[in-house]
Image: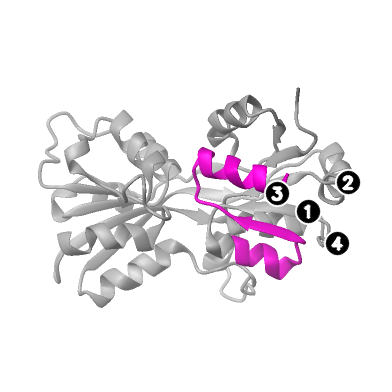
């Protein structure tokens, strides 16, 4: 029998299947209403050229499984291209698994331990900081938010407030402070979702009526705020998979916010606690 609380996941659609299965197995009724849509970016000629010679780098840094997927879609590795001198940094086990699926040996993957308190850039830095030195080059493969793409085209575009600085920017700062040369390439963009009118009409009752929302990005909360600009969040209940995300929810006014590690088992523990 399903438990009474409806669970609303907000993950990009391609990341939700295993979580839906796990949450349903725990007895909950669950849906995924994606609050981020991930779309590919077309690489520029100079970017493609840079990808043609990875030997300039000591490490490739992937901030998400989406970064891995879109990197390998954008750049078909030439047969015989040597990656023996490279390490592949991953912010968490999901990103590391994506690298393995694309043929990267586990011995060349650097990632926080599965028992780490969090899977993010600070935890990655704790295990990778000694692997790169001043004067060496790394390539960070990441995504772009749709508002940042607009800002690049229009310097008068106002800065969007209430989105915490990204872990990518934090890691870049740490690397540059250590004298490491950082190149960046954006291979996908994170956009606001295309919600149906039914979703928009139903969402307020799902916030005020006891459902539990699971957020794995501060941008998801920002996008929800854009979809429902006049919503009262005080009756809302949420699980946030990072401290930054939890803080964003609290600042928005969500009534109950539980912080969790971004693993299915930890999220289930938080759901049980709230329920």
- The residue beneath circle 2 is 205
Label 3 or label 2, whichever lies nearer to me, is: 3
- The residue beneath circle 1 is 227
Q: Are marks 1 and 4 in contact (CB under 8 Å)?
A: no
Q: Are marks 1 and 2 in contact (CB under 8 Å)?
A: no
The residue segment tinted magenta is 246-275
Query: Helix, strand, or loop for circle 2?
Result: helix
- The residue beneath circle 4 is 232
What label sits on residue 274 in the rendered view? 3
Q: Residues within 10 Å of mark 2 (few under 14, many from 20)?
A: few
Mark sitting earlier along the chain (1/4): 1
Q: Position of residue 126 (x, y in %)?
A: 28, 62
Q: Main secondary structure of the magenta part?
A: helix
What label sits on residue 214 in the rendered view? none
Q: Position of residue 144 (x, y in %)?
A: 49, 56
Label 4 or label 3, whichever lies nearer to me, is: 3
Side of 191 relative to 110 (left or right): right
Corner quadrant of residue 132: bottom left
């Amino acid at each position: 029998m399903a438990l009474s609380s409806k669970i609303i996941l907000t993950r990009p659609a391609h990341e939700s299947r295993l979580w839906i299965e796990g949450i349903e197995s725990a007895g909950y009724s669950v849906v995924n209403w994606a609050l981020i849509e991930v779309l590919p970016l077309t690489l520029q000629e100079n970017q493609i050229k840079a990808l043609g010679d990875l030997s300039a780098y000591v490490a490739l840094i992937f901030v998400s499984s989406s970064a891995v997927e879109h990197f390998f879609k954008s750049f078909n590795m030439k047969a015989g291209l040597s990656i023996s001198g490279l390490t592949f940094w991953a912010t968490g086990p999901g990103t590391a698994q994506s690298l393995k699926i694309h043929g990267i040996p586990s011995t060349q993957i650097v990632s926080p331990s599965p028992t780490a308190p969090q899977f993010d850039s600070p935890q990655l830095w704790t295990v990778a900081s000694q692997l790169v030195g001043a004067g060496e080059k790394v390539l960070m493969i990441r995504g772009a938010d749709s508002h940042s793409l607009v800002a690049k085209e229009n310097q008068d575009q106002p800065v969007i407030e209430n989105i915490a600085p990204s872990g990518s920017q934090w890691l870049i700062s740490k690397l540059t402070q250590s004298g490491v040369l950082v190149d960046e390439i954006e291979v996908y963009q994170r956009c606001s979702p295309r919600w149906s009118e039914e979703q928009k009409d139903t969402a307020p009752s799902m916030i005020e009526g006891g459902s539990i929302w699971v957020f794995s990005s501060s941008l998801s909360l920002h996008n929800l705020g854009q979809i429902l600009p006049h919503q009262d969040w005080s009756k809302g209940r949420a699980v946030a998979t990072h401290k930054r995300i939890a803080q964003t929810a609290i600042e928005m006014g969500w009534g109950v916010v539980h912080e969790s590690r971004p693993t299915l088992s930890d999220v289930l523990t938080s759901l049980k606690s709230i329920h």
